[in-house]
Amino acid sequence: MESTIKFDYFRGMEGEQYTFYRIPKVLFTAECFRSLSCEAKVLYGLLLDRMGLSIKNRWFDEEDRVYIIFTVEELAELLNCGTQKVVRLLKELDVKSGIGLIEKKRLGLGKPNVIYVKNFMIQELTRAEKQDLEAETLENTLNGENHNSRNVKITIQESAKSQFKNDENHNSGNVKITIQESAKSQFKNSENHHSRIVKSDIPEYPKSQSNNTEYSDIEHNENQSIDLSEGDVMERKKHYRNMVQEQIYYKSLIQNPRYQKNEVDELVELTVEVLMLPDDRMIWIAGDEKPAILVKDRFQMLNDAHFEYVLDSMKRNTGKVQNVKNYLLTSLYNAPLTMEHYYRLAVNHDLYGGGQAG
């Protein structure tokens, strides 16, 4: 018979003699933190607690800023969850992809990343900062990204081209404008979009792109330069490949007689290719152009059941597939949403013979 754990009451000042993780109250009361998940707030509390160790060890950079070292594996063990979930929670807090409470810095190969935990206290905004916030709110509306990114990226669909009718170089159906932090306020008051402080990046997409199921943004961007050394790229690929293989129980999957090793490897490499994309990239997938950060988040959820579902779906498909890569991308992207429904319908078919008694 299992023993039942019994907890006693706190009496008097006993509650003060223990060690606690502390989460700032403002994270639950301030309106600007409402969109932050409870798990991300707990994670911030863990990171904040680690600051004490950094101060004790005098881990300060050249600007006297405190930084911490906390690996994803350590956080996963503390939170009792998978590493991919920790990565998603860190993105919620990150200055580039989330609310801006932490900032990660890469030190190089073989060295752990350092994390700057930012002060949660909300400061009064100046007029210029309020204008910045309005611009970042527009970004959130158009791209579904968080307000607190330090760069503003505005995606203007074809219906909004009239805003730029005085500029003959803004005729693309999908215009991306990156405004550096020092130039945000100037953009609002200037019609000269070719200023040195404003960088415009207009990809030359084909006009019929929205109807072209052959198109894959991964292929389109393969030859674009990436600010990483070849060694860094290979190291990142190896990391993601190991992560994916661990999530799908790779060794067991390739030993399954229903599947061929090369088929499994193809899905693994395709998943790694997606995870390697920069967060601000757009991917043409599932009949639509989607932000890479959203697609990567979905691909990090993939496990062995999803891979088996996609492999089985490929075997059942008797039609001709024009673009195999795009078909597999779409299948992997949709797997977490459609797999359970498919198996439920299959069970109903087996139970009721594919029809209802009339």
Image (cartoon, helix red, strand yellow):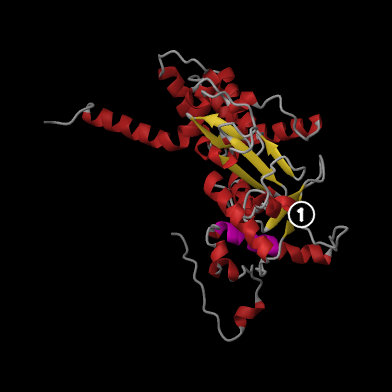
- Residue positioned 62% across, 69% down in the render: 24
Q: Secondary structure at mark 1?
A: loop
- Give residue 338's quadrant in the image: top left
Q: x and y percent of residue 30 in the render? A: 56, 68
Q: x and y percent of residue 232 in the render? A: 78, 34
What residue does disc 1 label? Answer: 69
Q: Is residue 350 left or right of residue 235?
A: left
Q: Is residue 106 above or below residue 120?
A: above
Q: Residue furthest bottom?
A: 12
Q: Amino acid at mark 1?
A: Ile
Q: Would residue 136 be seen by someone viewing this image from the given angle?
A: yes
Q: Is residue 29 above or below residue 321?
A: below
Q: Residue furthest left?
A: 358
Quadrant where the image shows the C terminus: top left
- Give residue 250's quadrant in the image: top right
- Residue positioned 50% across, 22% down in the render: 212
Judge by depth and name the residue closer to the eye, 316 or 305: 316
Q: Would residue 305 be seen by someone viewing this image from the given angle?
A: no
Judge by depth and name the residue closer to the eye, 265 or 176: 176
Quadrant where the image shows the N terminus: bottom left
In the image, is residue 43 part of the stretch drawn in magenta? yes
Q: Which residues are magenta?
A: 39-48
Judge by depth and name the residue closer to the eye, 27 or 261: 27
- Residue positioned 81% across, 61% down in the render: 65
Q: Residue furthest right?
A: 62
Q: Is residue 60 left or right of residue 267?
A: right
- Give residue 18's quadrant in the image: bottom right
